[in-house]
Image (cartoon, rainbow, N blue to C red):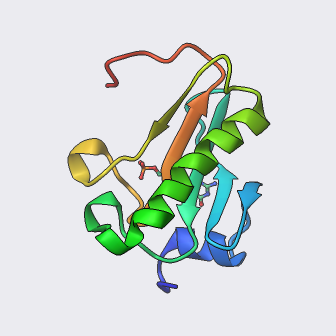
Amino acid sequence: MVNDCIFCKIAAGSIPARLAYQDDQLVAFYDLNPQAPTHILVIPRRHLPGLAEAEPGDQALLGHLLLVTRRIAEQEGIAASGFRVVINTHADAGQSVPHLHAHILGGRRLGWPPG
Ligand code: DGP
């Protein structure tokens, strides 16, 4: 837990969020500023600043996270119609919260390439 990290606080339950999924390693919650009809963030409970800071020892966690995004897409009813998983990493990608998070986006046709 990093004291000034908003996502650590959401994982700990000290900042409220509408949860979509949780287990012993991950928490998923609806994005405050949704960019699609379904927009959910999946984070590890343990503070990890981002994908660029992940290490070989995080392999199982990252694999679990990816499979959970699919599970949540199924739960939300967007697995068949299509969904996108995005991990913004560092400034050029627009990462604004330095705690690893995967966006799950769906429920409409998503443009490509992204802006
Ligand atoms: P990124 O730009 O990839 O770092 O995405 C950060 C996302 O986090 C952004 O879409 C808005 C969301 N967000 C930021 N603060 C909060 C919060 O307190 N609650 C929720 N539910 N989402 C938040």
Locate residue 115, reporting x and y percent.
31, 25
Left/right of residue 87 with respect to residue 55 in the rendered view: right
Residue 87 visible from this viewpoint: yes
Locate residue 96, reporting x and y percent.
38, 55
Q: Which residue is located at x 58 percent, y 54 percent?
A: 42
Locate residue 35, reporting x and y percent.
55, 31
Residue 32 visible from this viewpoint: no
Which image quadrant is residue 51 in? Answer: bottom left
Locate residue 30, reporting x and y percent.
68, 48
Left/right of residue 92 with respect to residue 74 in the rendered view: left
Q: Which residue is located at x 49 percent, y 18 percent?
A: 110
Q: Nearer the viewer, residue 33 or 47?
A: 47
Q: Nearer the viewer, residue 67 or 29?
A: 67
Residue 1 sits above or below residue 33 on the image: below
Q: Which residue is located at x 55 percent, y 61 percent?
A: 43
Q: Nearer the viewer, residue 3 or 25?
A: 25
